[in-house]
Amino acid sequence: MALERLRDAAEIVSTVWQRALLDAVVSPRRFRQAAPDFWRASAMLFHPEISSLPLSQVPASEDHIQMLSSGWPLGGMPPQDLYALLRVVKWIKPRKIFEIGTFKGITTTHLALNSEAEVYTLDVPREMAANLSGYSPGDLELLQPREAIGETYRPFNKNGQIQQLFGDSRLFDYQPYLGFMDLVLVDGCHIYDGVLSDSQKAFDLLGKRGAVMWHDFANLRAVTRAVRTLGRKWPIYHIEGTFLALHVRGVMPGDEQRRNLHTPSEIPVGMSSGDDR
């Protein structure tokens, strides 16, 4: 089965890159436009250090997943990624969630609607942003004024389930939250060093059991490179068909379906700071 999938993937990638090389010679302008898509097609299938995980292997829940008809706005998760994220949420049933990267708050809204967790979400307002070296024009465009951050979740936050935090994720004081989170979503800074820094904090935020997830794996080069670097040290899985990567620490409480997930039954803990909490 694995050999057949590998052969199919190799054939697809070979075809994609043959077309890419042809365009590079015959139509350089079209190649420049299509190159990012060629790269994503390759990265989605081949990612050394990161194992593949079919979404069907994430244990299903009897609870229905709620999704708003928000489309796919700039800076938001594609619907298939959002669904996969929420399937993990339904599986692990987190009590506390920390999201690095709020933006408009669409993902934040869905995290709250699909769990009973306290949701902490962190973003840096445009007026507080500093040290933007390495940011792409696209990343700079995602910087929002304070009043625009989280605007989507506000009508759904009457009970205060979502707590908005402001600050640069690389400099923010995480001390009150360390070791208490059941799920951490890394979806903020998209530069390599920033992703590594946010990931370090994510591992520190996680308790003895829970999950860290990254968005934009196999979508953005710097994020993909950073997650692959982390994958040399910790078991990380790419959820097939999405731009999500997943690390699971320990066994989820009350989860009889854990054996259905093709990951080790006891995954070694991540950063040492959370080991004895």
Image: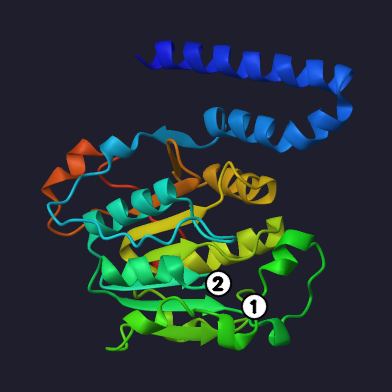
Looking at the rendered image, the quarter that the C terminus falls into is: bottom left
Return the residue at label 1: 144
Q: Would you say 116 lies left or right of 220 here?
A: left
- Label 1 sits on a secondary structure element that is loop
Residue for badge 2: 103
Q: Residue at x 67, y 64 (%)?
A: 194
Q: Check disc 1 and give the amino acid type.
A: Gln
**Is disc 1 surrounded by few (<14), some (14 to 19) or many (20+) residues within 10 Å?**
some
- Which of the pair 82/178 is nearer the observer? 82
In primary-sequence order, the first of circles 1 and 2 is 2
The picture quadrant where one finds residue 124 is bottom right
Which residue: 27% across, 36% down?
56
Vertical arrangement, residue 70 with respect to residue 245, above or below = below
Instruction: Name the residue nearer the viewer: 70 or 210.
Output: 70
**Dot 1 and dot 2 residues touching (CB under 8 Å):** yes
201 horizontally vs 132: left or right:
left
For badge 2, the amino acid type reads Phe
Provide residue 52's location: percent of width, then percent of height.
43, 33
